[in-house]
Amino acid sequence: MRVVICCDGDSPFEILRDVLTLGGVLTDNGHWVAFIVGDPVALVDQAGRWIPNSIFQAPQIKPSPQLVMKRPPVDGLADSMAVAGFDDKQTLLTISAVWREQLVLLQPDAIVGVRVPVLWLTGPTVAPTLAMGPGTALPPVLGSSFPRLSADSVELADERQMLGHANAVLARFGRPSLASLSEVMSSCSPLLYGLPIFDPYLQLRRSVTTGVLGELPAPAIPAPEKRVVAFLDAYCPGIETIMLALVGVENVSLDVHVTGAPSGMRRFLEQQPGVKVWTAFGALLEQTAGASVVVHHGAQDVAQYAICAGQPQLVLPWTREQEIFSYMIGWMGLMKTQSPTGSIEEIATTLSNVLRDSSLTVAAQHHARQFSRASMPNALPIMVERVEGLSQT
């Protein structure tokens, strides 16, 4: 069976890790697997080694310039579709044609798309397609309009315009028109995974999550020595300030992984006393048990792992999706949120307060025990079964 797994250029590193995990199991089962991703180098870097699969560059739109008159933060699937090309007819026609030609050349029996609305539109014209993702990446289909997270999302008039552009693409491919924009995703076979508490659309869904990706850790009591585990992103505004604040906290050991870190940044961290730099994201994630605090930007798999292990968290969100995520878990009382653009003193003070606040540890341990009793299933076998079943539909 030939399977093509695709994700866009803006996919966070936890999504890349998920597609690598799925692709690895399918490869072990004897299937031919290829990846079409926005950043092939980041995919291989995330794996920590060369992967025995074909990797291709995904067709994507050049990012918009950083202007004062730019679009508000993306607030839902309709917004993400607009910035992906649905708001311009010629752009959508072109990028859809490029996606389709690339898929036709690979001749897949099944297609998996994560956070790629253009692929959800064109993929079913080539092979059975699975729209896969966690709560924020796979919003539900509700009639003629997508649910919005704020009033700044795409207006209904814009959705009608995007629907006309999508139908122009389908007409070019000889396919019937869509009655509503939501049918772009309903033409695929959807598969949702992740912890339900991370899903901003949970109350709107007709189907519940299939479970989490991988085995969850057992609750662990933090060690008496102060140890901070940090998962950072080199593209985050103020990343240098964050690093200086973390290494400046006294009597604390630091284990850190920085996605996209240049060599100079890594050398700086390696020269600091009490700091260990990890190149493999997954290897450090498995070593978070016993950490006093887990620091991250709002990565779902990091938060998921830390919650289930009973670790307090310091979240430094810098994208709209991460801000929504931190809001979703704020009620649990096991984390503090800090702006990444704050001063060194502000970030260091917040981290010191988290290390001293025993109530965060108590809340984290409570929720860890609750999740251990919930026995969330591993979604990976279900994913593999669904993908292998696509070729039979």
Image (cartoon, grey):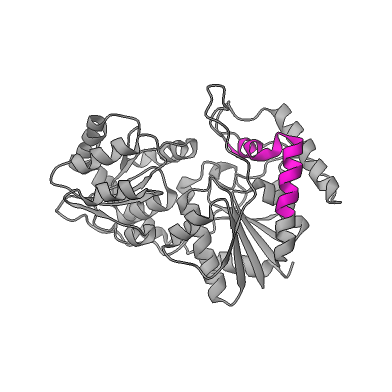
Quadrant showing the C terminus: bottom right
Residue closest to the eye, 41 or 335 = 41
When asked about the image quadrant of residue 296, the answer is top left
> Would residue 134 appear left or right of 386 to someone viewing this image?
left
Question: In the orientation shown, which residue stands out farthest toward the front?
Answer: 264
Q: Which region shows up in magenta?
A: 76-100
Query: Residue, x 60% and y 46% (percent of image)?
Result: 205
> Would residue 351 appear left or right of 108 to someone viewing this image?
left
Magenta span: chief secondary structure: helix
> Would residue 173 appear left or right of 256 to someone viewing this image?
right
Let me know if residue 6 appears in the view.
yes
Give coordinates of residue 308: x percent, y percent.
Answer: 35, 55
Give coordinates of residue 125: x percent, y percent.
Answer: 78, 56
Query: Residue, x 42% and y 47% (percent of image)?
Result: 299
Q: Is residue 288 above or below residue 161?
A: below
Give coordinates of residue 257: x percent, y percent.
Answer: 33, 52
Say whether residue 344 is magenta: no
When asked about the image quadrant of residue 100, the answer is bottom right
Residue closest to the eye, 55 or 324 = 55
Quadrant showing the N terminus: bottom right
Question: In the orientation shown, which residue stands out farthest toward the top?
Answer: 69
